[in-house]
Amino acid sequence: MIPDENRLVHREPLSPAVLELVESESRRGEAIAARLRLVLGGIGCLAILGNWGSNAVQAMLVATGAVAVALGVAVWAWRRARVGGLSRRDRLLVSTVDISFVTAFSASGLWNFSGPYETLLAPLPPVLYTIFLVFPAIGGNIYVTAYAGLLTGLQRLLLLEGIILAGAVETSAEAVYGQPKIGLPDQYTVIAFLFVVGALLTTLAWLLRRDSIHSAEETISRQEAERVKANLRKYLSASVADLVASRPEALALGGARRMATVMFVDIRDFTPLTVHARPEEVVEMLNTLFGELVEIVFRHGGTLDKFLGDGLMAVFGVPQEQADAPQQALAAAAEMLEVTRVLDARGIRPDGEALRIGIGLAHGVVVAGNIGSVQRLEFTCIGEAVNYAARICGLCTALNQELVVSETVYDACRDLYTFREMPKIKVKGIAGEPTLWAVTGPRRPGGSSSS
């Protein structure tokens, strides 16, 4: 069994996607060759009609038969190329007909007035041989091109030896010009030339196949990178997604300690909503709200960690370090509250109640990275700051506030916003009674940062 052509230029088996692109490129070359073959067939028909009276009848009949067979196969190959391409057997058949046509066309000169001298000395057959050798090469068909090159040289050699054995011409062991003799060195040089052309075009087919494989691999790699980047942009801002996509090691199993600001958002009175509204209406509301909130997160350089049913978790400062993470997180939270009010005015909550959210922010050390197994990874953050932000978000209702932050966030943003210190309250999982701050608005020029 003949090995796969692709193994001649690529040791490893090709993926189905790469193989499909390579075969598509090969079929494109075959389609070009098929059209050129039809053009040559048409030119051959015109040449026969134009020279019918200037050649012997037997010569014209042989040439006409050769052209008819070649043109018929050319039409068949053209149709096959249009509906899915040719198999290797088809390609071998077409090349056999191509080369045999040139040999038969050349042999038709034996019945002409100058007989075998015309057959062996006419310049057109070597040119036609070369043209038909180019056809399998442009499709990157290595084996077929090599086969056609060997067939060309052998047929030309057999034609020469047949004429010599028949004693149809007088031969000379030396090159002769202007005499009724055939110089054998010249004839063997032509045959050697045809073998060399076959070898060169086989090399060209090899190079085209190699370049086609490399181009297909680059295309697939680029498509995969774009697919990964598109998926990342569902969770990361565009700039961060581009950074992570350019550094695949960032998605390896494991994590890294980072200073980050963690945000938790939840929808107030969500359980009654699920009882009184149809599921389709709830999903539509969530999609609308979350679409707006996630866009805000991305706009401020944050990362969507996960959706939580009736809320979401976002992180600022992961995976790319963000020096102003607290400020960006608080700006995003303030913008979220404004957007929620706009959506509430549009009446997107299906049960008719007011659409309200609660937001908790905490800043501190987190461990960020892919957690899970090599089969299933999830990029997320864990750590005390994550737990703290989740607890603060849960306390918004009890504190009757929309936006509550930890003291570290307050310290980083106290000059940008006005705050109100919350009454001391026990936070589950946090030692003592930490100080929490509610954001009451942007800081006014000359105003106090807290009240």
Image: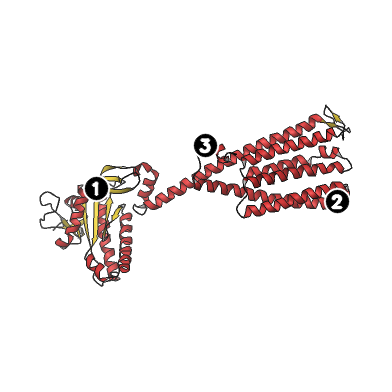
Q: Please tell me which residue lies in front, 49 or 416.
A: 49
Residue that appears at 57% across and 47% down: 23
Residue 446 appears in the picture as rendered = no
Task: Using the image, determine if residue 139 lies above or below residue 181.
Answer: below
Report which residue position mark 3 lands on.
11
Residue 109 appears in the picture as rendered = yes
Task: Classify residue 181 as left or right of residue 227.
Answer: right
Q: Please tell me which residue lies in front, 426 or 109.
A: 109
Q: Separation of disc 3 and disc 1 at Cα?
A: 44 Å
Foreground: disc 3 or disc 1 = 3
The N terminus appears in which quarter of the rendering? top right
Q: What numbered label is drawn on residue 52?
A: 2
Q: Please tell me which residue lies in front, 68 or 441.
A: 68
Residue that appears at 29% across and 49% down: 380
Dot 3: few (<14), some (14–19), or many (≥20) neighbours within 10 Å? few
Q: Position of residue 96 (x, y in %)?
A: 71, 43
Q: Position of residue 283 (x, y in %)?
A: 32, 65
Q: Separation of disc 2 and disc 1 at Cα?
A: 89 Å
Task: Classify residue 245 as left or right of residue 166.
Answer: left
- Dot 2 or dot 1: first in sequence order is 2
Residue that appears at 40% across and 52% down: 230
- Dot 3 or dot 1: first in sequence order is 3
Q: How many numbered badges does the structure rendering display?
A: 3
